[in-house]
Image (tube, rainbow, N blue to C red):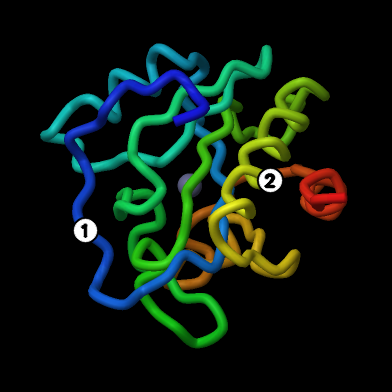
Amino acid sequence: MPYPYIPSPNYDDRPEGVTVNCVVLHATVEPTVQGTINIFLDPAKRVSAHFIVGKEGQVIQMVPVEKRAWHAGPSELDGKPAVNDYSVGIEMVNRNDGVDPYPEVQMQAVAGIIRFVRSRYVIPDERIVSHATVARPAGRKTDPRNFDLDRLRRLARIP
Ligand SMILES: [Zn+2]
């Protein structure tokens, strides 16, 4: 794996025959990488993501992309439920208050992860989505607030 790896116990197998075809972006609310790692290491919390990206652009992987991380909860994309089944989840360290910025190095690191995922799976631009977009019922989640998704989609293209 191309990133430092700290295994979370909070994952399981994707359903038989299901292929990754989207990326879900999150904001941690939790203000540090280490705090987020600790949450994803706790079996009682039953949450995880494939990647955590810090504000200095540090990346930690916690679940292999071929496995199902537990990040989206009740969710739907283009009429298809259970987005965890077919997505890669990326947690960006950010307070999600709509004011806390996403520094350029963090943005570039997220784009790099998506390019890595695209070296293995087909992910159309419009299937790089926010947690807020896929969470059900609608309005259950707001993350990542005030994040420039269009810019990320441009940065994450493979030339
Ligand atoms: Zn989220």
Q: Which residue is mark 1?
A: 13
Question: Which residue extends farthest bottom?
Answer: 79
On screen, residue 141 versus residue 69, left or right, reads: right
Where disc 1 sits, the SS reads: strand
Characterize the local packing of mark 2: few (<14), some (14-19) or many (20 or more) Cα atoms within 10 angstroms: some
Q: Position of residue 48 (x, y in %)?
A: 32, 39
Image position of 115 (left or right of 80):
right
Above or below, 96 against 73 in this view is above
Q: Residue at x 71, y 25 (%)?
A: 106
Of 125 and 78, nearer the camera is 125
* Residue 101 to residue 140: above or below: above
Query: Is residue 95 found left or right of 60 in the rendered image?
Result: right
Residue 92, percent from left and from top = 58, 32
Tell me which corner region of the image, top left, top right, bottom left or bottom right, holds residue 75.
bottom left
**Helix or strand or loop: what does disc 2 sit on?**
helix
The amino acid sitting under disc 1 is Asp
For mark 2, what is the residue? 115
Which of disc 2 and disc 1 is earlier in sequence? 1
Q: What residue is rendered at 69% in x and 36% in y?
A: 112
Q: Look at the numbered disc 1 and say if its residue's Cβ is closer than 8 Å to ligand 1.
A: no
Q: Name the amino acid type tagged 2.
A: Arg
Against 140, is 148 above or below?
above
